[in-house]
Amino acid sequence: MRVALIFGITGQDGSYLSELLLEKNYHVHGVIRRCSSFNTKRIDHIFDKLILHYGDLLDSSNICSLICEIKPNEIYNLAAQSHVKVSFEMPEYTTEATALGTLRILEGIRISKVKNIKFYNASTSELFGKVQCPIQNENTPFYPVSPYAIAKLYAHYITINYRESYNMFCINGILFNHESPRRGETFVTRKITRGIAKIQKKLETSIILGNIDTYRDWGHAKDYVYAMYLMLQQNEADDFVICSNEQHSVREFCEISFSFVNIHIKWIGKGIQEIGVDQNNNVLIKKHEKYFRNCEVNTLLDR
């Protein structure tokens, strides 16, 4: 029976990946941080089928010990400080966890001398940042514009470096945005859908957003974790872009989401003063400058 080790098992992708690997009869090990409040709700339904270990991407000796103990066939690095806006507020921690955390796993694999480990690193479309061409692919130059993306850039290239320097099977999955009901509630897609639910229940009157004219290539997390799995089934390691090949704006996302509860959004005003209203001119969408990023990525699309 094959053995997988997942860093970031309690996140959106980690939970879906765990389900997939269990269906394929893997022994699934996951690393969780020891903290005052457990956040395992995404894996509670499969909790008894998983083998969980305390660990932290800041602790290299712990990582190495886990790899030596578990002897996994596959390691998936899905752990990171993954919120772009937070990375401007916590750049040092973002770098430690996201950039150096990846290095620590790679070093753990190298030092452990456990044979034939395949390593997947969750890279990101945020690497493209200030895009140099309208459509991105594996050969598009990177231009990251946030501490998160810059940390991911280091993780991306150190993964390639270990592949080339030590002949290790290491893959980067450059994933475009992917969503699901398990997406973190601070991300804009969940903020919008939860906001609509609260408006419908009369718990709130409006949703407050930042730049609604950014464009993203959105997919579903279930599809993307299946792609992660397929990457590690290849005979040769390489880097792959995963996308939906469609682009939509946050504005469109708002309009489509509200349409599911039979509300047609009309836009009034310009700039920061622009609002979205319903058929009765009730204000349902507002903007606030605090939700604008320091350096915005305006468009991401792959083909």
Image (cartoon, rainbow, N blue to C red):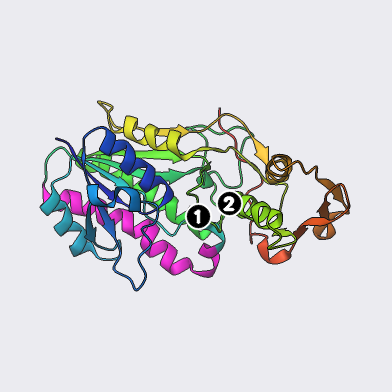
**Residue 190: assigned label:** 2
Q: Is residue 162 magenta?
A: no
The span picked out in magenta is: 86-113
Q: Position of residue 288 (x, y in %)?
A: 73, 64
Q: Across the whole image, how many numbered discs are drawn on residues?
A: 2
Question: Mark 1 belongs to which amino acid?
Answer: Gly
Quadrant of the snapshot with the N terminus: top left
Look at the numbered disc 1 and give the secondary structure of its residue. Answer: loop
- Is 259 left, or right, of 172 in this rendering? right
Q: Nearer the viewer, residue 294 or 25?
A: 25
Quarter of the figure with residue 16 = top left
Q: Mark 1–mark 2 contact, CB under 8 Å?
A: yes
Q: Nearer the viewer, residue 4 or 62?
A: 4
As measured in the structure, the alpha-carbon distance from the residue carrying label 1 to the one carrying label 2 is 7 Å
Which residue is at the far front? 201
**Residue 184: assigned label:** 1
- Is 303 left, or right, of 100 in this rendering? right
Question: Mark 2 belongs to which amino acid?
Answer: Arg
Residue at horizontal 54 percent and vertical 69 percent from the top: 89
Q: Position of residue 67 (x, y in %)?
A: 16, 52
Look at the numbered disc 2 and give the secondary structure of its residue. Answer: helix
User: Which secondary structure type mostly characterizes the magenta part of the structure?
Assistant: helix
Which residue is at the far bottom? 36
Quarter of the figure with residue 96 = bottom left
Asked whether residue 160 is in view, the answer is no
- Is 198 left, or right, of 128 in this rendering? right
Q: Position of residue 210 (x, y in %)?
A: 70, 57
Residue at horizontal 33 percent and vertical 71 percent from the top: 35
Q: Position of residue 4 (x, y in %)?
A: 22, 43
